Amino acid sequence: DVKVTQSSRYLVKRTGEKVFLECVQDMDHENMFWYRQDPGLGLRLIYFSYDVKMKEKGDIPEGYSVSREKKERFSLILESASTNQTSMYLCASSEPGTGSRTEAFFGQGTRLTVV
Amino acid sequence: GDSVTQMEGPVTLSEEAFLTINCTYTATGYPSLFWYVQYPGEGLQLLLKATKADDKGSNKGFEATYRKETTSFHLEKGSVQVSDSAVYFCALSGSSNTGKLIFGQGTTLQVKP
């Protein structure tokens, strides 16, 4: 079974803290993604990576950074957490290319609350 | 830019009712289209997909047909069950090679016994 694993299901952090969300995939996928899910807004792309040490900004990168030192691991970093970053965060991975190969596999999500 | 629009929810149905969730898209080129489902407390999982015009994706009794002329990919099921209660997301993958998915806002389905 293919698997994308996020390190935490629930996190509570304080305003101003530096927060790390970790994601690991076991499918040897080149692409990895971080999305944020908010009610009524669907999923919005924060950052994605198409190779080790490569990253590109998505639609809402402000306040976030990412790290990909190894192919299987993609970390999302909140430099200084704020209450408006309270949300569900979803990691995904996929193979590169068009058509059906771009099916994405998702982790179970991390619900982050910033107080 | 590319975008996906889904019908507003929540949708509440009785068991065995017919389901339609509308999805329309705007995209350049020839995107692939997907429906993902999110059960309570879980991440997203692929429900079905279609990669070219007139393709029909199907899975677990759900179907959707890629209609290029109306830029639509509506999700249908003939007889819903309580276990289908979930959030459904329509998504597209553009013609670029990045693998990025663009999602609609999601539609919550609640099926009552």
Image: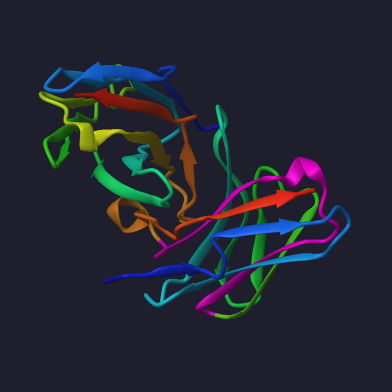
Q: Nearer the viewer, residue A18 or B96?
A: A18
**Residue B12 is drawn in which quadrant?**
top left
Which image quarter is the N terminus of chain B in?
top right
**Residue B24 is drawn in which quadrant?**
top left
Residue B111: x %, y % from top left: 26, 25
Above/below status of A35 relative to B81 = below
| Outermost residue, front side | B113
Please give left or right for residue B88 compared with residue A111 in the image: left
Residue A20: x %, y % from top left: 71, 67
* Residue at image point 39% right, 65% down: A95
Provide the residue span drawn in magenta.
A71-96
Which image quarter is the C terminus of chain B in?
top left
Above/below status of B55 relative to A33 = above
Residue B50 visible, this orientation: no
Magenta stretch encompasses residue B7: no
* Residue at image point 34% right, 18% down: B11
Q: Nearer the viewer, residue A4 or B82?
A: B82
| Outermost residue, right side | A16
**Residue B15 is drawn in which quadrant?**
top left
Residue B44 visible, this orientation: yes
Residue A15: x %, y % from top left: 86, 52
Above/below status of A56 relative to B68 = below
